[in-house]
Amino acid sequence: MLPHHQLVLVQRADDLIKTKSTGTPRQMAKRLGLSERAWYYLLDQLRNDYGLPIVYCRFRRSYYYTDDASHWEDFLQKFINYPLYFKNNGLIC
């Protein structure tokens, strides 16, 4: 599960991926304010833990989703429904 403070990173990544304007992995990491290694770690979590269909196109030099679904809303719903983040009907930050 991603910590609450990483939601901003995930939303920014989602926006860049939806518009296919991420650039190379190194450029994506820079746009998110992460190291390249940290970007790969986050990408691995998004793909494997949350099932987001993110792929990289070497020709376009950008990440993209393999379908047109709204992934940010799906991700946020999974995050909010995660039981460790609830206490007394409120979100723990």
Image (cartoon, rainbow, N blue to C red):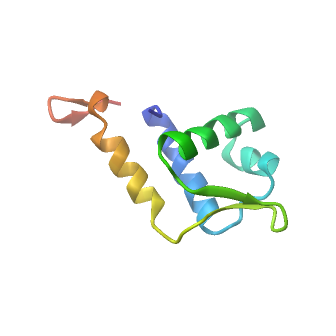
Picture layout, residue 59 above or below residue 39: below
Q: Is residue 85 left or right of residue 50?
A: left
Q: Is residue 76 left or right of residue 34?
A: left
Query: Going 74% across and 33% down the picture, which residue do you hit?
Result: 37
Can you give x and y, in whole percent of width and height, for residue 76 in the image?
38, 50
Picture layout, residue 69 above or below residue 75: below
Please name whichever residue, 40 or 33, is drawn nearer the observer in this view of the structure. 40
Which residue, as the protein is rendered here, is positioned at the far left? 88
Can you give x and y, in whole percent of width and height, for residue 90 in the image?
21, 35
Q: Could you tell me which quadrant the C terminus lies in? A: top left
Q: Is residue 29 left or right of residue 75?
A: right
Query: Going 81% across and 68% down the picture, which residue do you hit?
Result: 60
Please name whichever residue, 34 or 59, is drawn nearer the observer in this view of the structure. 59
Please name whichever residue, 25 or 12, is drawn nearer the observer in this view of the structure. 25
Which residue, as the protein is rendered here, is positioned at the far right? 59
Locate residue 19: give its quadrant. Answer: bottom right
- Give the total of numbered labels: 0
Can you give x and y, in whole percent of width and height, for residue 67 in the image?
54, 69
Can you give x and y, in whole percent of width and height, for residue 80 in the image?
31, 43
Query: Going 71% across and 50% down the picture, which residue do you hit?
Result: 31
Query: Going 30% across and 27% down the picture, which residue do you hit?
Result: 84
Q: Could you tell me which quadrant the N terminus lies in? A: top left
Locate residue 56: give its quadrant. Answer: bottom right
